[in-house]
Image (spheres, rainbow, N blue to C red):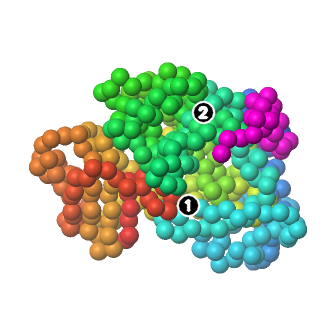
Amino acid sequence: MKAPRIRRIFYAVVPFRFRYEKTFRKTLSFLKKSNKEEINNRSNYQFEELKKLLVHSYQSVSYYRNLFDKIKFNPEEFKSFSEMERIPFLTKEIIVNNFDELQSDRYSNAKKYEITTSGSTGKKLKLLVTDDVFKKEAAFVLNAYHAHGATLYNKPSVWLRRYVPENENDSIYKYDFELKRLYMSAYHLNENSVYSYFKVINDRKFHTLVGYPSSIYLLALLAEGTNLKFDHIKSIHVASEMMLPMWRDKIRQVFNLIPYAHYGQMEKVVFMHQKDKTGFYVNNPEYGYTELFENGDQFEIIGTGFINYAMPLIRYKTNDLAIGPSYQAGELMGVESIIGRNDDFLTSAQGNRIPGVNFYSWVNKSLPSITLFQIKQLKNRKVLFKFVSEGNNLTELVQIIKDGLTARLGNVEMEIEQVESILRDPNSNKLRAIISEV
């Protein structure tokens, strides 16, 4: 249905920042100023925000009041970040079992919204937030876009996500006049339809292309070897899915544009974003307090979020992993890469857990003809390896895959299959490269 003419004129004339309430404008303005602050100033701000959240949680959240009393932790006397180590980790299971006790009684009469995680691991998590959380979150996201010259709201953008036609004869795209976004279905991309996608995108001056990394990567694969190119797109921004090196390289090669990403969670405890060509993820200390715990070559991400006071999460185990942390004057500046979830491990014949990054790098370096792959490990440790390949020598390729899997997992039973496409996870709509039932 087309937006009424008056509304369209309003959307075109009045900038989004004036339509999205003052909390959004105030947060974005603060972030622009904070980007230029000295490290000490940002660290002091983070400490004060952390202490304020701890005091609030003790005074108004029964779960934390009971926990802090039990461990003899007084947030009023909080003097150092190191004291956070006294507080036990918060997990999904704890949240599920203490859902009511984790809500602040100061927001009992406030309008709250239920949000859930995607459930890509099969377990959805329910949380509660107030309306201002969405406004603040939007400011952090927009700040991440601005960091590499991308834009939202003020200039039209193309979104290769968030839209699936309801009926077979529905259009593969729809336009949102309020947000100036062209939503296109990522599920209908193929060798024949890709020409229509580029025609629609190039017919108007869309500035930024947004999508899951896997969706933009697939678009690049389909465009490669054709005369298809973007006439107006100046930036590419991705999120909500791990960016494999092979995907990033291909997108850059085909479109001559570097895809930049931001990292966050539905639980809203940690926020990082990329802003230069290295792909380094810059930590946002204004969003929360982030801790990294070493686990071999990887670091588990633990977060305490500052923006949700209605249901605060303190030392929450995100189950996400990072590599290459960088510190300056004791402050976490960021990480080299976000490498996926703690669940994305495979188990060797000897029972050792091996993180997915080992398999991503192997495929990227040793199997260049493979464009998409998925490794699924069943409960009995049998491995199913599905792949999409541009190569012709299937027998040789299968043997290389077998040798590679054996070298990493030992003598586990395996089944290798070449397929035309890899289906997305039905719960999260993401393309999961590693799935483990062990």
- Residue 97 to residue 392: above or below: below
Q: Is residue 48 left or right of residue 212?
A: right
Spatial CA span between label 2 and label 1: 24 Å
Instruction: Residue at 40% x, 42% y: name it.
Output: 189
Q: Is residue 342 visible?
A: no
Would you say residue 17 sits in the magenta stretch? Answer: yes
Under circle 1, the secondary element is loop
Q: Which residue is mark 2?
A: 157
Query: Neighbour class for label 2 at 10 Å: few (<14), some, many (≥20)?
Result: many
Residue 426 at what x, y percent from top left?
Answer: 46, 61
Under circle 2, the secondary element is strand
What secondary structure prevails in the magenta region? helix
Instruction: Residue at 57% x, 55% y: name it.
Output: 301
Residue 379 at what x, y percent from top left?
Answer: 33, 73
Amino acid type indicated by mark 1: Ser
Q: Quick one: quadrant of the C terminus?
A: bottom left
Q: Is residue 238 left or right of residue 316?
A: left
Q: Quick one: quadrant of the N terminus?
A: top right
Amino acid type indicated by mark 2: Ser
Residue 413 at what x, y percent from top left?
Answer: 20, 67
Specify the label residue 118 is tagged with: 1
Query: Neighbour class for label 1 at 10 Å: few (<14), some, many (≥20)?
Result: many
Question: Across the whole image, how many numbered discs are drawn on residues?
Answer: 2
Which residues lie in the magenta part?
Answer: 1-24
Q: Quadrant of residue 303?
A: bottom right
Instruction: Residue at 46% x, 45% y: name it.
Output: 186
Viewer-nearest residue: 125 or 77: 125
Residue 227 at what x, y percent from top left?
Answer: 35, 22
Q: Is residue 374 left or right of residue 366?
A: right
Q: Earlier in the sequence, mark 2 or mark 1?
A: 1
